[in-house]
Image (cartoon, rainbow, N blue to C red):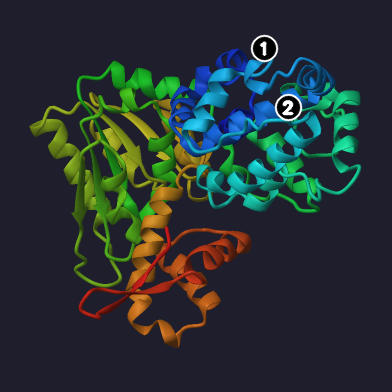
Amino acid sequence: MTVDTKELVTTIAYLIGVKDEIMAKVFEPDYHDLIEKLRQSKEACIIRYLCKIRTTLFYKFKDTDHEMRFNLKNLDRLEWYDKENIKKLREWGIDIIKPNYRSEKYMDDMCELIAANIDNCSTLFYDWVNWAYIRDLFCIPKYRQKGILKQEFLKFLEKNAFYPFHMYIYWNPQSLGNILHNDGKFLSLLYQWHGDYFEDKTKYRDATDETKNTIYDFVNNSGRTAIAVDCENSDVYKLYGVLKNLNQDELAKIEKIVLYDDEHTSPGWDFLGKFTHIPVEHIEVERVTDRKSLVDIKMTAGVCQNYYENSIDSFIIVSSDSDFWGLISSLPKARFIVMYEYEHCGQALKNALAEHGIYYCSIDDFCSGNTEELKKAVLFDNLEQHLPDLLQWNGKELANQIHLEARIDATEKEIAIFYEKYIKTLRLKFDHDGNVSVIIAN
């Protein structure tokens, strides 16, 4: 079973200026670290403060105009605007306070400033999300044309209840419930508004708390725990999704991850140790013949050695291979959890595990949306290997090739985004001696 994540909608809610007390109640319990990261981001805060001012201008347009016109007050002297936000914007070189201004002119300025600064927030989102669609929520097209902002003003006041947490975004407001309820609902609607369809549900679906708590309990009730991975029968990016989406304090109790690898598996296994705080042992298993892999034998021997010699009493086995039932049944006093892939694990193995009270879950259930950093590291490494003969490649074919070599399952859209963002933007760099190299934009 899986549940939809809220990482994307948490970021959107923060940027559009949702009140702190709502952020704390609705989003912060599950995404405290993300919100802290956004609070430390100058780019995110600039957009948040500007959006809050724009929304307040919509609410208080006439009152603001009256105070400016008859009482000679400005935004920083009106109680309904956040003076600390205005002060902070000034410190960052965005001094929004102008003399002899009216509400209409301030609204123009807010729209201009948001449009000028919103692209700085593109790095807050994963590459697999269409940034142009996100950007459209913040920018009002042709806002300087007569009647456009008045139309948005009237629409916002009339259908305010439909706007997410009553904060302004540019859209056609409809009775759709909370569009920021979770990432799945938001992505589905966002793409639908642009005549598109979001395909990959694994990007926003994660394992349930029940699954995660079972893993935590297993680790906490163990003496010493290790993760043993059959790299031939596991997907490195899905396993990273497991590690990425579990509580890091709980994972810190795991002694090590042991990778039993074959020369023909994904190059991603070489990078896993750089993206987790758990110590990683990478055991490369040589083949006696090209036809026969010895990974399963080596892994069986390794688990037994760790049990008898290193006093590791509990193992999380990552493999879909039924051959490991022999290993599990031969260590009756050891404790096991098995993580498998739906596509490669038969019902017979699941039945055997269930009959013996061994918990199992699928690595497919864990969210893949936040595994981009590992995938990009592998893709960039593969791309760098092709740079010496770059001129012999068609750029689009190269994008497909390096995804194939990295063994990353990606949609045509994701490969196209990688091509546009990283291959088309390759540039030459000359050092002070005139030596040339090719730089990947990141």
In three-dimensional space, the C-alpha distance between marks 2 and 1, rounded to whole angstroms, equals 15 Å
Q: Place residue 384 in its image quadrant.
A: bottom left
Which residue is pictured at 75% across the width and 26% down the height? 57
Residue at the bottom extreme, as displayed: 392
Quarter of the image that includes the N terminus: top right
Instruction: Judge left or right: residue 181 versus residue 410.
Output: right
Of the numbered discs in the image, which one, if any, rests on residue 39?
none
- Looking at numbered disc 1 in the image, what kind of residue is underneath it? Glu
Q: Position of residue 341 (x, y in %)?
A: 48, 45
Q: Is residue 238 above or below residue 215?
A: below
Q: Percent from the top left, x then y, of residue 269? A: 31, 54
**Quadrant where the image shows the C terminus:** bottom left
Q: Position of residue 281 (x, y in %)?
A: 19, 46
Callout 1 secondary element: loop
Left or right of residue 312: residue 295: right
Q: Amino acid at mark 2?
A: Thr
Residue at the (49%, 69%) spot, across then down: 425
Q: In the drawing, what numbered circle is on residue 79? A: 1
Tell which of 283 and 133 is nearer to you: 133
Q: Is residue 216 above or below residue 202?
A: above
